[in-house]
Amino acid sequence: MILFDGGSAMFYKSTRNPNLKLKASQAIAKGLSDEGGLFVPSSLPSVSDKFEAWQKLGYLELAEEIFKLFLDDFTEEEIKDCVTGAYSPEKFGGKTPVKIVPLAKEKAEYMLELWHGPTCAFKDMALQILPRFLTAAQRKNSGDKEAVILVATSGDTGKAALEGFKDVDGTSIIVFYPDGGVSQVQRKQMETQEGKNVKVCAVKGNFDDTQTGVKIIFNNAEMKEFLAEKNCFFSSANSINWGRLLPQVVYYFYSYFELCRTGKISAGDEINITVPTGNFGNILAAYYAHKMGLPVNKFICASNKNNVLADFIKTGTYNRKREFYLTSSPSMDILVSSNLERLLYLLSGENSESVSLWMKDLNENGSYTVDEKTFAEISSKFVGGYCNDEETAEIINRVFEDDKYLADPHTAVAIGVYEKYQQETADKTPVIIASTASPYKFSESVLPALGEGTEMDEFSKVKKLEEISGVIAPVQIKELETLTERFNVVIEKENMAEFVKQTVAEKKA
Ligand SMILES: *Cc1c(COP(=O)(O)O)cnc(C)c1O
């Protein structure tokens, strides 16, 4: 990687190496730093003075303004092309790709629906635009080299990445998911994926095994060499890529402005933000927005029974040595939340030495404890909590009965954790709760929560849920029934590298 030399206001460093200085396009093309660290911007620009002007912008215009601040080696035209291509009304069902819906009339609780894109999960918000960022970045840096995108998914990322990258020139994509660790609809969505540059493979193991497998391949010198020989290089669509995190910053600003525009809050008022959390990308984007000037009181980090983050926020010790549970919210079944590293980097005062040691501890001993100052920073802004599957089902039932809101299990976890926080603190700050998936992606959990049986095939479940909820299912989910499965490979985790080699060799033969 060529290091560029000053000049520009914004550059990118690694959380584990203070001496790196990359352009935005380099950070995006590369995905992960060689020593294992994550790329972070050299500064977070303050935008408080832009609020008045920004309030008047539509979603796409706002996205362009924010991206310009961070992608300063992209031309305005490139950014505009990326944005308009990614967030078209055809893909997101309307002029604005997100929707903000009050949960209950008399309360200041707003659902930020992020799942109106092609795969019905919030990951579309980032994964529709990442491939566009990446191809633009590639043109600047690596000429005609082909990016091989490796993805480890606990469900939603895989499909969203496949949709984003399918038939994008100069890229190919390989998605690994834990066999038996995703919902039936998620599996079907991936196995039926179309496109000539896509591959899908199930791995015996859980999500962390899959993610670890991908990280090992990424950092394996022999694999890198093999790819270089084939005129390819690895890149990542996982939320460790800066090009995935950045698009998520936009909707926190947008929803704040929308609450201002509709008179729910006044400009300058603080809000709370609650996010159902897995890899810590979505909530981190909210924190970045805050660091840029968004007035936020508390970040409420919601976990399922895999409550490693809730414990960390309470104690300052991150300990992944614990039982791993498969839950009704599989996209949050994670014991190693990769993006937390970026938060630790910020809150430790950009101390890459400490961050490197903590991550080494995590790798070698399965746990680490942050220093007191960093812990105090975390405690001042973050609240952690969790809901088990039983509580999650209760929430789905209750918000449907009381508020006529049909929540998927991930979103229900967030609502549940927010309610617990509310009961403990009586905090009346208006709250934005991220709603991260269409309930129809998880009808096998949503139906029983509403008191219905599930002794039927997956598509009858979708129809049943439509019947009892009166909410129409997205066509992308209904049409799955008629699509043929293209992939059905299951491999041992030790064979992931071999699978990648074979795929690249076939493509380049
Ligand atoms: C990925 C995902 C999450 C977790 O988001 P992170 O950014 O990984 O914390 C929550 N809900 C759904 C539906 C998801 O797909």
Image: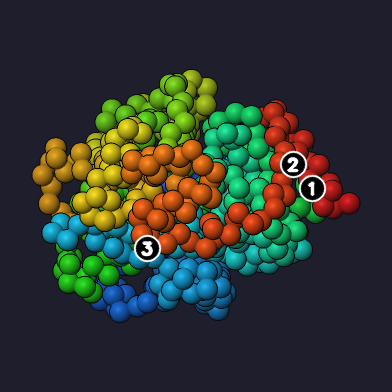
Crowd rating for badge 2 (residues with CA inside 10 Å; few <14, some 14–19, many 20+):
many
The residue beneath circle 2 is: 500
Q: Residue furthest right?
A: 509
| Nearer to us in this view, 396 or 1 | 396
The answer for how far apart the CA atoms under marks 1 and 3 are is 36 Å
What residue type is disc 3 on? Answer: Tyr
Q: Residue at x 52, y 63 (%)?
A: 475
User: What is the number of the mark on residue 504?
Assistant: 1
Establish if 264 lies above or below 421: below
Direction from residue 449 to residue 245 in the image, left or right: right
| Nearer to us in this view, 239 or 161 | 161
Q: Residue at x 32, y 32 (%)?
A: 390
The answer for how far apart the CA atoms under marks 1 and 2 are is 6 Å
Q: Earlier in the sequence, mark 1 or mark 3?
A: 3
The residue beneath circle 3 is: 251
Q: Residue at x 34, y 26 (%)?
A: 317
In the rendered image, residue 164, in percent from the top left (x then y), is placed at: 60, 60
